[in-house]
Image (cartoon, rainbow, N blue to C red):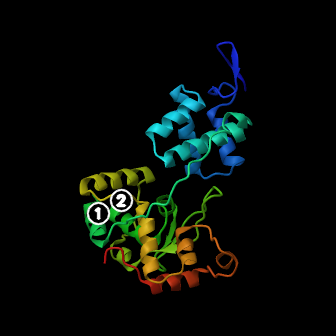
């Protein structure tokens, strides 16, 4: 769509959504783009921020560039590119904007002492169980909360993702978890867990979120000698190499053997 401004025609002015509703865009993200629910929500939230800014694309992205990180800039640009280029079929509005190069920053994870301090500061037993289970399984919070759990095998079976960017196979929880897990429903949400972890992080001064525990899991499995392709499998990441994709056995029996042999401990 072309907009008039002060008598001149400008193709890169802000697009006012008077033709398509947000629900139309949401359907497009879910059906045509086949994105996961979390990714859809992120794009909708970012687009809403843009619309409420009352800025055109150039002004909005300049503001984001000045006030936000490169990662945030990338997230906003991703949403706007899908909206203008793919949904509205108006690539000229967004085509001049390029994704920023995000350099590698070595990650420093909490050590054992910090993990214990954080764990002890969690307010309720169920959050301690979730903490240990996330750290010993490598799963995402949403996967754990919706998973089926086979306690006889200590196996966690996530439900399939509804998007194309993530995978979920199976993982397990360790003996530390088994010692405190009461098998009751968690009765909580991803947002609640996020807020609880943030409160504890502020209280203890330990920079940590539920997502951090996926990296802690990968660290412990790597230290135990587990091959990357199996760590990726437990974490639900897409296999990268030909060997990982076509010549590796991911049967529950093999994964259970690999997991048990690693015998990882998050607090011990």
Q: Position of residue 264 (x, y in %)?
A: 40, 80
Residue 246: x and y in percent read 70, 78
- Secondary element at tag 1: helix
The residue that appears at 60% across and 53% down in the rendered structure is 36
**In the visual, does 143 lie left or right of 216?**
right
Disc 2 target residue = 208
Residue 187 or residue 177, whichever sits in front: 177
* Residue 193 showing in the rendered view: yes
Give the farthest residue toward the right.
89
Residue drawn where x is 37% and y is 74% of the image: 177
- Packing grade of label 1 (10 A; few <14, some 14-19, many >=20) is many
Tell which circle, 1 or 2, labels the residue nearer the N-terminal end: 1
Q: CA distance from mark 1 to mark 2?
A: 9 Å
| Quadrant in which the C terminus appears | bottom left
Quick check: 102 above or below 233?
above
Q: Are marks 1 and 2 in contact (CB under 8 Å)?
A: yes
Rendering coords of residue 233 (x, y %): 57, 73
Residue occupying image coordinates x 30% and y 55%:
201
- Picture layout, residue 45 above or below residue 265: above
Residue located beneath label 1 in the image:
118
Q: Position of residue 11 (x, y in %)?
A: 70, 27
Left or right: 240 in relation to 221:
right
Q: Is residue 170 visible?
A: no
Viewer-proximal residue, 241 or 210? 241
| Residue at (68% x, 51% y) in the render | 34
Q: Residue furthest top?
A: 7
Task: Name the image quarter holding residue 77.
Answer: top right
């Amino acid at each position: 769509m072309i907009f008039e401004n002060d008598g001149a025609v400008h193709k890169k002015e802000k697009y006012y959504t008077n033709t398509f509703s947000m629900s139309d865009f949401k359907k497009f993200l879910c059906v045509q783009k086949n994105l996961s629910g979390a990714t859809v929500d992120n794009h909708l939230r970012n687009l809403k921020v843009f619309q409420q800014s009352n800025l055109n694309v150039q002004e909005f992205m300049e503001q984001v560039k000045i006030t936000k990180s490169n990662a945030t800039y990338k997230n906003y640009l991703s949403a706007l590119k899908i909206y203008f280029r793919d949904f509205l079929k108006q690539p000229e509005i967004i085509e001049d904007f390029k994704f920023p190069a995000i350099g590698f920053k070595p990650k420093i994870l909490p050590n054992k002492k910090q993990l214990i301090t954080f764990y002890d500061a969690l307010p309720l037993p169920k959050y301690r169980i979730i903490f240990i289970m996330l750290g010993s399984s490598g799963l995402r919070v949403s996967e754990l909360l919706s998973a089926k759990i086979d306690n006889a095998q200590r196996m966690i079976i996530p439900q399939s993702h509804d998007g194309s960017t993530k995978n979920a196979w199976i993982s397990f929880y360790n003996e530390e978890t088994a010692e405190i897990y009461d098998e009751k429903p968690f009765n909580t949400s991803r947002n609640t867990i996020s807020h609880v972890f943030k409160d504890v992080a502020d209280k203890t001064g330990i920079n940590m979120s539920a997502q951090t525990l996926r990296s802690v899991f990968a660290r412990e499995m790597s230290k135990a000698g587990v091959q990357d392709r199996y760590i990726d499998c437990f974490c639900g990441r897409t296999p990268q190499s030909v060997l990982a994709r076509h010549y590796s056995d991911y049967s529950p029996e093999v994964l259970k053997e690999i997991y048990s042999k690693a015998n990882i401990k998050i607090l011990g």
